[in-house]
Image (cartoon, helix red, strand yellow):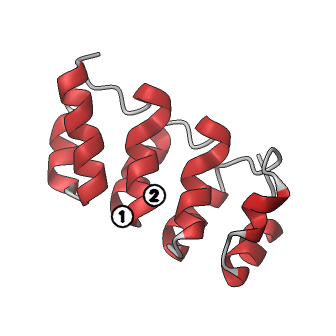
Amino acid sequence: MNHHLQRQLDDACWIGDANLVAHLLQHPEVEPAGHHSTALLHAAHRGHWQIVEILIPLSNPCDRNSEALWRAAKHGHRRVARLLAAVSDTSGWQPWMWEELPERIRHSIQRMPTI
């Protein structure tokens, strides 16, 4: 793994630069699931659904106790939360984590089966 390129991927996911993400993913030294799927976490946190869609099959949405889903839901990114809910595991979430989510998103996630 090239740490400089990995940081560029994480930053591109944070700012939502899908073209740069796609370009970086072509590099053999970039690991989309690197650093516990930080790239996915950043894209989810910021609500960049197109990037999340690209990264889901290349990352591990369950990393860090499915924190990517939790961050997307907490910040009201419904589309991202729907994408991630289907491939995440919320069984380890603590009650406070559920309580911090907007009610509408919390209920939609709780109705989805966990993996």
Residue 112 shows up from this direction: no
Classify residue 19 as left or right of residue 11.
Answer: left
Q: Residue at x 54, y 75 (%)?
A: 78
Residue 49 visible in the displayed image: yes
How far separated are the C-alphas under marks 2 and 1? 6 Å
What residue did someone put label 2 on? 44
Residue at image location 15% in from the left, 53% down from the top:
19
| Marking on residue 111 | none
Q: Position of residue 9 (x, y in %)?
A: 25, 39
* Residue type (three-letter) at the residue carrying disc 2: Ala
Residue at 78% x, 60% y is 96
The residue drawn where x is 53% and y is 76% is 76
* Residue 94 x, y percent position in the rendering: 81, 52
Observer-nearest of 66 and 99: 99
| Contact? badges 2 and 1 (CB < 8 Å) | yes
How crowded pointer 1 is (Cα within 10 Å; few <14, some 14-19, many 20+) is rated as many
- Above-or-below relation of 69 to 101: above
Q: Is residue 15 left or right of residue 98?
A: left
If the image is split into quadrants, where does the N terminus sit? Answer: top left
Q: Return the residue found at the far bottom.
A: 104
Up-down relation of residue 3 to residue 105 (above or below) = above
Tell me the amino acid under the disc marked 1: His
Quarter of the image for residue 43 reads: bottom left
Report helix, strand or loop for mark 1: loop
Q: Which mark is residue 48?
A: 1
